[in-house]
Image: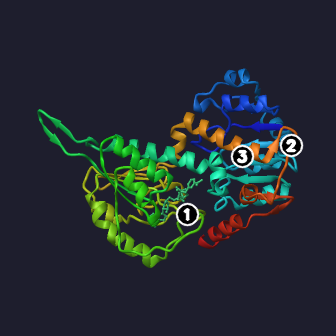
């Protein structure tokens, strides 16, 4: 069973799908593992560390693609790479079904079996494979540091001979994996934290981290599988109205609200940003899917009339070593669920396999992926 890993080619991507110590475990389990020369460099991982782990290192991308039984990657494969894969090869990566319809159709046409980590079910059996969680947690942590770095204030309360400094006020919108880690990080730095989510189930978790849960007089539509559902425009308008005053009171707003496969909901309008104090910071961790703030420019940090609006995309890539380590464990755990050293053993009765397999035997076999592709095509 040949496992192959390439250098990531999406601009700004610094992660790599396998790190040496995880690759060593695969090699010990009789998988034949090879990686493109330099693939770990942006995460600080040198080729010699892979060699020492029993991994082949090859500069020839095309040869690696042609040999792969399973290609492990972080980002969805590019069209050129898909064309070089063998029919019946498999890929495991983030596949971004909503925006990668062309790649998904190409994978199906090529006869490749492609798995999407976004579609992994959120069940306890799949927790060790949950790359959305591992990477979301890094985003929440780093998002708070990015905000602290720009804010012209301390986070903690300080009592000094020169006077008392009050603690910074942080508002976290969306209390999923990234939001909860943002709350924990902001609390560790000493800020006073408020948080809001449409799912009332997270209230106790928010409180246990030492933050206040904002109760808005709104009735949200329940989602499925622990996820939020896309709320109607009327709900979102009312939500923005009710949040305006809390956004204005905050020194830092961290937004993380998302609905799987949909554009991020708009929680903070331009006029709400206009109501924030000069020197305040908004970090929009939903910028990869369009952003929660109307004035976010994905990939840019802008001074909007004295308020910093940080739309950095792919935040996990700014912590590339730990992001890669966690991702490598997630992807390897899924690989070992789907395959042994002798080859793939796909059981479509199994919930994990069925939920995250997107293409197989020349077809797009995943209804959720298909719905995401259609919803995005209609939105455009
Ligand atoms: P996500 O990234 O899809 O969304 C982030 C948060 O945004 C969610 O909490 C969501 O409720 C919230 N949100 C959506 N619309 C909003 C709006 N209009 N206003 C405010 N907030 C809004 O979610 P996620 O972080 O990937 O987590 C989703 C769920 O999965 C959570 O319940 C999490 O605890 C659960 N989970 C379970 C497992 C497991 O059991 N294996 C593992 C990881 C996560």
Residue 178's place in the image compared with 152, above or below, is below
Q: Quadrant of residue 317?
A: top right
Q: Is residue 361 left or right of residue 338?
A: right
Name the residue that disc number 3 marks: 334
Query: Residue 194: image x %, image y %?
Result: 33, 56
Q: Residue at x 52, y 72 (%)?
A: 222
Can you give x and y, in whole percent of width and height, for residue 73 in the image? 70, 43
Q: Secondary structure at mark 2?
A: strand
Residue 207 in view (yes/no): yes
Mark number, residue 116: none
Say what secondary structure mark 3 lies in: helix
Give the CA separation, mark 2 to mark 3: 14 Å
Few, some or many residues within 10 Å of mark 3 (<14, 14–19, 20+): many
Q: Quadrant of the N terminus?
A: top right
Q: Against 230, is 64 above or below? A: above
What crowding class fits label 1: few (fewer than 14 Cα within 10 Å), some (14-19), or many (20 or more)? some
Residue at 33%, 66% in the rendered image: 243
Towards the viewer: 87 or 186: 186
Q: Secondary structure at mark 1?
A: loop
Q: Disc 3, disc 1: CB below 8 Å?
A: no
In the image: residue 310, left or right of residue 341:
left
Q: Is residue 377 left or right of residue 278?
A: right
Q: Which mark is residue 227?
A: 1
Q: Which residue is mark 2?
A: 343
């Amino acid at each position: 069973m040949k496992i192959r890993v390439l250098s990531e080619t999406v601009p700004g991507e610094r992660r790599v799908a396998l790190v040496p110590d995880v690759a060593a475990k695969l090699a010990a389990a009789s998988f034949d593992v090879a990686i493109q020369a330099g693939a770990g460099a942006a995460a600080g991982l040198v080729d010699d560390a892979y060699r020492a782990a029993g991994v082949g290192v090859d500069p020839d991308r095309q040869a690696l693609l042609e040999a792969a039984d399973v290609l492990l990657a972080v980002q969805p494969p590019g069209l050129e790479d898909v064309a070089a894969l063998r029919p019946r090869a498999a890929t495991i990566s983030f596949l971004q079904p909503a925006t990668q319809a062309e790649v998904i159709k190409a994978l199906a046409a090529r006869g490749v079996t492609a798995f999407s980590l976004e579609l992994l079910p959120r069940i306890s059996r799949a927790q060790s494979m949950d790359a959305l969680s591992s990477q979301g947690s890094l985003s929440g942590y780093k998002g708070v540091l990015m905000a602290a770095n720009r804010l012209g204030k301390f986070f903690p309360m300080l009592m000094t001979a020169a006077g008392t400094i009050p603690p910074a006020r942080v508002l976290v919108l969306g209390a999923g994996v990234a939001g909860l880690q943002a709350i924990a990080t902001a609390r560790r730095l000493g800020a006073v934290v408020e948080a809001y989510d449409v799912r009332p189930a997270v209230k106790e978790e928010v409180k246990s981290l030492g933050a206040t849960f904002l109760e808005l007089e709104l009735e949200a539509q329940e989602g499925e599988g622990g996820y939020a559902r896309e709320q109607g425009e009327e709900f979102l308008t009312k939500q923005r109205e009710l949040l305006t005053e809390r956004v204005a009171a905050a020194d830092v707003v961290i937004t993380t609200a998302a609905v799987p496969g949909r554009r991020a909901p708009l929680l903070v309008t331009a006029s709400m940003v206009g109501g924030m104090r000069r020197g305040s910071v908004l970090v929009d961790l939903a910028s990869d899917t369009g952003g929660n703030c109307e004035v976010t420019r994905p990939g840019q940090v802008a001074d909007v009339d004295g308020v910093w609006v940080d739309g950095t995309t792919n935040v996990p890539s700014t912590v590339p070593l730990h992001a890669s380590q966690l991702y490598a464990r997630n992807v390897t755990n899924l690989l070992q669920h789907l395959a042994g050293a002798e080859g793939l053993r796909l059981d479509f009765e199994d919930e994990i396999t069925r939920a995250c397999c997107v293409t197989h035997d020349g077809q797009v076999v995943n209804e959720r992926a298909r719905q995401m592709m259609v919803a995005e095509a209609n939105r455009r």
